[in-house]
Image (cartoon, grey):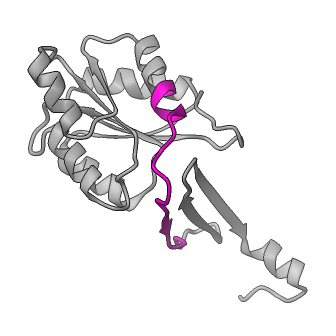
Amino acid sequence: MGFDESGRQRRLLVADDDDFARNVLVRGLARLGFQVVAVVDGEAALREAREALFDAAILDWVMPGLQGPDVCAELRASESTTDLPIVLLTVRSDEGEVERGYESGADEYLTKPFVLAEVEAVLTAVLERPRPRGTTRVLEPEDDRSGVEARLVRTEEAVVELQTDLARLHADLGDEPPH
């Protein structure tokens, strides 16, 4: 489940100010094979979603600062995250609140307390749904200490991580890598 059909590990963003719920999600999702980035508030969730690519996000409804539906609406309004699958997680279950969650742009809605099997089922559903066509997002290569450039490209069906080992590239081209 935590890997796509090409074998690439899926990345999830989890935003929840409740330490217990956040830790349960992080540990459970990691056991399912996901790479999980966890934050404690809405502003941090927006920052992470704008700086890196994720296959899906799980947002708690009630957090300090920006609430989950507000984060969801912001993500939907941004061209780079408009097609990110989003699950709202909350203790709120009355019909009006559920409707408000979907109106903010959430793909799915889970109530607390949750069991990991529910989270897994909902993630499977949102990750397998077709996303809008034509959304492409490219992050420029990051300068990391290992000498590997990473370029992430969001395609209409998946996020594909392209990594190029510079030394191998130079060897393939028959020239010497810069020192």
Give the side of residue 137 with respect to residue 71, left or right.
right
Picture coordinates of residue 62, whole percent (x, y): 13, 31
Farthest-out residue, front:
133
Give me the residue at 87% from left, 84% from top. 173
113 over 147 or under it: above or below: above
Q: Is residue 125 visible?
A: yes
Residue 61 seen by the camera: no
Query: Which of 97 and 25 lies nearest the eye of the viewer?
Result: 97
Whether 138 is among the magenta residues is: yes
Q: Residue at x 57, y 47 (%)?
A: 157
Instruction: Give the mark count.
Output: 0
Q: Residue at x 14, y 35 (%)?
A: 63
Front residue of this view, candidates 7 and 95: 95
Residue 114 vs 174, above or below: the answer is above
Horizontal side of 151 relative to 76 (left or right) equals: right
Residue 53, percent across and down?
45, 54
> Does 157 sit left or right of 136 as displayed?
right
Magenta stretch holds residue 14: no
Residue 97 in the image: x percent, y percent? 12, 24
> What residue is drawn where x is 72% and y is 89%?
178
Tell me which segment is drawn in magenta: 124-142
Say whether residue 110 is left or right of residue 155.
left
Q: Position of residue 134 (x, y in %)?
A: 49, 60
- The quadrant of the image that shows the N terminus is top right
Q: Identify the image quadrant of residue 126.
A: top left
Image quarter of the C terminus? bottom right
- Reply above or below: 107 against 46: above
